[in-house]
Image (spheres, rainbow, N blue to C red):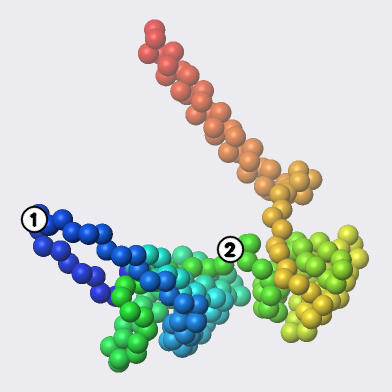
Amino acid sequence: MAQRGRATGRQAGRTPARAAAPAPARTSPTELAARRARFEAVIGPVVAGTGYDLEDLSVKQIGRRHLVQVLIDGDGGVGLDTIAEVSRAVSRALDEAEESGTDLIKGEYQLEVSSPGVDRPLTLPRHWARNTGRLVKVKAGDKTLTGRVTAADADGVTLDVDGAEHALSYDALGPGRVQVEFKRMNEISDEELAEFDDDSSDDDEDFDDDEQDDEGEQR
């Protein structure tokens, strides 16, 4: 998160008492939408240039400041290094825009770049494609389906619902929601069980060593 804009300084020493400053005027939805468009015109090409998608951009007023939130995503996911890289690139682009006279926003604002969480609704073909193999809940007409995404392209998605495949067009679907799954014991591989047993053995050895040390100190 980067704080941008101009901050006012204050001289040290006692400050004479004065009346509380009036609450800042709320920005109208129309002006917020206009500001969002100005930011998107600068940020969109930068994110695309890094090979990622600009999933969402919002401008919110919080007290006297504004919060600019940028959500990015990619086919291979987004790591912390990518977040930092894109954040620096966006920050540089905003600096250059302000220096060239672009009126982005008045006063201070904070820039926050992040990736969408698992609770992000699936609304675009690329969202479905990136969640191939995951369990998704979605409303299709008057039915609510919960199935695993087996395929997704520009026209629609295929869901495996209790062993039966359903080919659905995006026009017939509402927003999809990825479902959090917990592995059952019979789905855990032998390799994962072996790793768990090794970790447990190490913990038991450490516990035995601690007990011996305690007994030695008492004697």
User: Which residue corresponds to mark 2?
Assistant: 117
**Residue at x 28%, y 88% (from the top left corner):** 99
Mark 2: amino acid: Gly
Task: From the top left corner, tell me how far across and down residue 219 is, in percent.
Answer: 39, 7
Indicate which disc residue 64 carries.
none
**Residue at x 35%, y 68% (from the top left corner):** 24
Q: Is residue 200 left or right of residue 34?
A: right
Mark 1: amino acid: Gly
Number of marks in the rendered image: 2
* Quarter in which the N terminus is drawn: bottom left
Q: Please tell me which residue lies in front, 132 or 65.
A: 65
The image quadrant that residue 177 belongs to is bottom right
Q: Residue furthest bottom?
A: 100
**Residue at x 8%, y 55% (from the top left corner):** 13
Quick check: can you spot residue 200? yes
Quick check: can you spot residue 2? no
Label 1: few (<14), some (14–19) or many (≥20) C-alpha neighbours in 10 Å: few
Q: Nearer the viewer, mark 1 or mark 2?
A: 1
Q: Is residue 128 left or right of residue 157?
A: left
The image quadrant that residue 170 belongs to is bottom right
Q: CA distance from mark 1 to mark 2?
A: 46 Å
Q: Is residue 85 left or right of residue 198?
A: left
Task: From the top left corner, tell me how far across and down residue 155 is, in percent.
Answer: 78, 84
User: Which residue corresponds to mark 1?
Assistant: 13
Task: From the top left corner, tell me how far across and down residue 147 is, in percent.
Answer: 81, 63
173 to 209, vertically: above or below: below
Q: Residue furthest front?
A: 19
**Residue at x 60%, y 38% (from the top left corner):** 198
Task: From the top left corner, tell me how far across and down residue 142 is, in percent.
Answer: 87, 68
Q: Are marks 1 and 2 in contact (CB under 8 Å)?
A: no
91 to 146, vertically: above or below: below
Label 2's element?
loop
